[in-house]
């Protein structure tokens, strides 16, 4: 049998077996007109679109009077009673206006610790009342000392053996709120995100403070430590 190419060329063969067709029908795909919300019949899979591809372009019923777009369904609630979970946050009103009423604002407070003179390497411990929970704002000292703050006396006692500049084991030893070494004047440290809370049982408002003379050569005169904080829980 001769090849098809030679049969369809003029003079190259006959067209026996072929029938001429006048005005052949055109198979043109058009988007359906949808009067109500429904699924696009040209969508190939039930997965919502992630990026631009042919299936994504079919997601929107362009010709429908109520266009629809396919999205992921809402998750089924597993809460007993078919109710939702509501988290309520209540701010503590600690401020007061000029008329004696509550202003609804959190007001910062401060506490101070008097520290005697310290010989080289000497340690001084103290307890000061702040709040059950608080946000630390700033710490200041009148001398170049190291200041450590704790949530419990047990944490304070256990941390006495740690030397200055040794890494604080926050990930394995709870109760150490902060550790600041003042070595350059002015001796002030400001925090942006330091939250503390008392860990006694029952809980109290105590903050446990350790002050160390980090120098092994010279002593430091008596100093005053100041803590500025925002009380969160009285």
Image (cartoon, grey):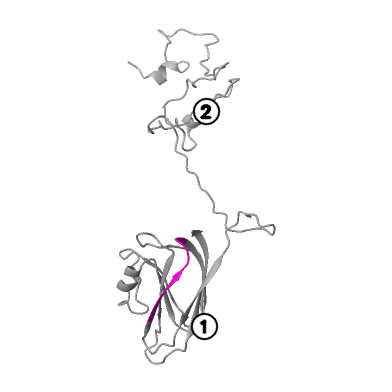
Q: Residue at x 51, y 15 (%)?
A: 27
Classify 10 as above or below 158.
above
Residue at image location 40% in from the left, 32% down from the top? 77
Q: Does residue 128 show up magenta in the picture? A: yes
Q: Is residue 90 above or below residue 49?
A: below
Q: Identify the element where label 1 is drawn.
A: loop
Q: Residue at x 41, y 29 (%)?
A: 82
Quadrant (top left/top right/bottom left/bottom right) for the N terminus:
top left
Query: Residue extending furthest right?
Result: 99
Residue 83 pos. (x, y %): 44, 32
The quarter of the picture where residue 158 lies is bottom left
Query: Mark 1 sits on what residue?
Result: 142
**Pick the front one: 208 or 34:** 208
> Is residue 148 among what the camera can see?
yes
In the rendered image, residue 114, in percent from the top left (x then y), is placed at 47, 80
User: Of residues 17 and 114, which is closer to you in this image?
Assistant: 114
**Mark number for residue 41?**
none
Q: Which segment did they paint magenta?
A: 124-133
Q: From mark 2 to mark 1, how far is it between C-alphas? A: 67 Å
Does residue 12 show up? no
88 in magenta:
no
Label 2 crowd (10 A; few <14 / some 14-19 / many >=20): some
Foreground residue, 125 or 27? 125
Q: Main secondary structure of the magenta part?
A: strand
Residue 69 — which label?
2
Q: Nearer the viewer, mark 2 or mark 1?
A: 1
Residue at 50 percent of width and 44 percent of height: 88
Q: Secondary structure at mark 2?
A: loop
Looking at the image, residue 5 sits to the left or right of residue 32; the answer is left
Asked whether the beta carbons under mark 2 and mark 1 sit within 8 Å of each other, the answer is: no
Asked whether, in this view, residue 209 is left or right of residue 23, the answer is left
């Amino acid at each position: 049998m001769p090849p098809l190419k030679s049969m369809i060329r003029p003079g190259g063969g006959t067209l026996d077996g072929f029938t001429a067709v006048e005005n052949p029908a055109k198979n043109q795909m058009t988007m359906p007109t949808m009067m109500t919300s429904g699924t696009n019949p040209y969508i190939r899979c039930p997965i919502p679109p992630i990026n631009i591809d042919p299936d994504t372009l079919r997601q929107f019923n362009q010709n429908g009077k109520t266009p629809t777009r396919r999205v992921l369904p809402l998750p089924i609630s597993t809460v007993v009673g078919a109710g939702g979970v509501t988290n309520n946050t209540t701010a503590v009103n600690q401020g007061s206006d000029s008329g004696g009423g509550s202003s609804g604002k959190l007001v910062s407070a401060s506490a101070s610790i008097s520290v005697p003179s310290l010989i080289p390497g000497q340690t001084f411990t103290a307890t000061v009342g702040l709040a059950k929970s608080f946000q630390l704002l700033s710490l200041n000292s009148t001398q170049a000392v190291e200041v450590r703050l704790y949530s419990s006396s047990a944490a304070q006692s256990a941390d006495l053996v740690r030397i200055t500049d040794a890494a604080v084991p926050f990930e394995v030893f709870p109760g150490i709120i902060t550790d600041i070494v003042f070595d350059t004047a002015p001796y002030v440290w400001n925090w942006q995100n330091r939250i503390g809370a008392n860990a006694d049982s029952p809980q109290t408002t105590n903050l446990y403070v350790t002050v160390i003379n980090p120098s092994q050569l010279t002593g430091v005169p008596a100093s005053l430590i100041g803590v500025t904080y925002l009380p969160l829980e009285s």
